[in-house]
């Protein structure tokens, strides 16, 4: 039994497909298949149930995968401890962020980090909170930047900054005559929101519960967009209005679009950094905390 074989079965359990798992492990499909079969023979159990259309875990396979993830995690910790004993700012750092934070934070964060720690390369990734949570837990990422609330066992979370939400609308929109917007006004408008899976969508709906009532009295409609940037373009074409975090309202065409704040208390979100409690490179985390907290540009 080797760490490589354990990595193969964990990847296969995630992909549920031999070809995709082999590609992710950078080996041929026969190599991965033989290794998995060898491990099953050594343990004298079937970890996976195979069919023409699917690869699923057996009941005992679920337990084996959970333990394999723990073993791989401990092996990564050993490597991280060795690296930290050399120079915690002299090795790559893998950082993830949710889609509604990464495009606005990373362009400021990356050069500042490079200036202070030129030998520490940053591998950055953007994804949904649920995906980043798993990647952090499995050691694929060292730290993630998310919006609170965020709870995960054995993970430390520290706030970075707070940012308000603003309403973005066509310049000639009827709401542009107002100085501030009440959340209760949103259901009566043609509202543009992110698609399912984005936590920012959930936060907008939470601040205005009427948006989630299928049989409510709203006379407007809700249209989905794939990103905050897409929503801005959709507003510019006159499709409706949207809600954005303050950090995302830069580069607006003032000839087409205008913004209005919400009435106090204005809805907002807290952006935070999360990392495994066992992660040994404390200086790298401290640098992220100190630097990211200064990156939010007020518009």
Image (spheres, rainbow, N blue to C red):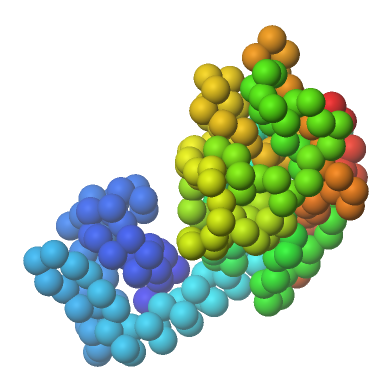
Number of marks present in the image shown: 0
Image vertical order of residue 168 relative to residue 130, above or below: above
Q: Position of residue 116 (x, y in %)?
A: 86, 33
Does residue 47 appear to the left or right of 191 in the view shown? left
Of residues 74 and 255, the one drawn nearer to the viewer in this rendering: 255
Residue 33 shows up from this direction: yes
Of residues 182 and 17, the one drawn nearer to the viewer in this rendering: 182
Does residue 206 appear to the left or right of 46 in the view shown? right
Q: Which image quadrant for residue 62?
A: bottom left
Image vertical order of residue 67 relative to residue 201, above or below: below
Residue 268 shows up from this direction: no
Residue at 48% across, 61% down: 214
Q: Position of residue 225 (x, y in %)?
A: 49, 38
Q: Which image quadrant for residue 35?
A: bottom left
Image vertical order of residue 185 relative to residue 49, above or below: above
Of residues 107 and 196, the one drawn nearer to the viewer in this rendering: 196
Does residue 37 appear to the left or right of 167 in the view shown? left
Q: Position of residue 11 (x, y in %)?
A: 38, 63
Quarter of the figure with the C terminus: top right
Image vertical order of residue 82 relative to residue 259, above or below: below
Of residues 245 and 181, the one drawn nearer to the viewer in this rendering: 181
Q: Position of residue 169 (x, y in %)?
A: 67, 28
Residue at the extreme top of the image, as rendered: 255
Q: Which image quadrant for residue 122?
A: top right
Quarter of the figure with the N terminus: bottom left
Residue at 44% across, 68% down: 3
Residue at the extreme left of the image, as rendered: 52
Residue at 28% across, 65% down: 16
Residue at 41% across, 86% down: 63
């Amino acid at each position: 039994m080797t760490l490589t074989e354990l990595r193969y079965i964990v990847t296969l359990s995630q992909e549920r497909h031999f070809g995709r798992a082999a590609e992710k492990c950078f080996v041929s499909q026969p190599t991965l298949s033989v290794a998995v079969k060898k491990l099953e023979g050594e343990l004298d159990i079937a970890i996976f149930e195979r069919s023409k259309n699917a690869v699923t875990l057996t009941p005992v396979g679920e337990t084996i995968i959970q333990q394999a993830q723990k073993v791989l995690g401990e092996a990564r910790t050993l490597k991280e401890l060795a690296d930290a004993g050399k120079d915690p700012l002299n090795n790559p750092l893998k950082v993830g962020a949710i889609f509604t934070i990464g495009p606005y934070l990373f362009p400021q964060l990356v050069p500042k980090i490079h200036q202070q720690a030129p030998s520490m390369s940053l591998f950055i990734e953007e994804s949904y909170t649920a995906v980043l949570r798993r990647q952090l837990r499995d050691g694929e990422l060292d730290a993630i930047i998310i919006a609170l609330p965020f709870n995960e066992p054995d993970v430390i979370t520290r706030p970075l900054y707070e940012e308000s939400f603003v309403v973005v609308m066509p310049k000639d929109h009827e709401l542009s005559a107002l100085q501030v917007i009440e959340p209760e006004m949103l259901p009566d408008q043609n509202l543009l929101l992110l698609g399912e899976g984005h936590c920012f969508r959930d936060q907008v709906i939470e601040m205005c519960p009427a948006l989630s009532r299928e049989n409510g009295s709203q006379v407007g409609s809700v249209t989905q967009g794939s990103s905050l940037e897409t929503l801005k373009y959709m507003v510019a074409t006159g499709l409706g209005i949207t809600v954005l975090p303050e950090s995302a309202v830069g580069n607006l065409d003032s000839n087409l679009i205008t913004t209005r704040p919400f009435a106090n208390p204005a809805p907002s979100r807290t952006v935070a950094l999360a990392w495994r409690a066992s992660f040994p490179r404390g200086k790298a985390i401290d640098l992220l905390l100190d630097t990211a907290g200064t990156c939010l540009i007020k518009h």
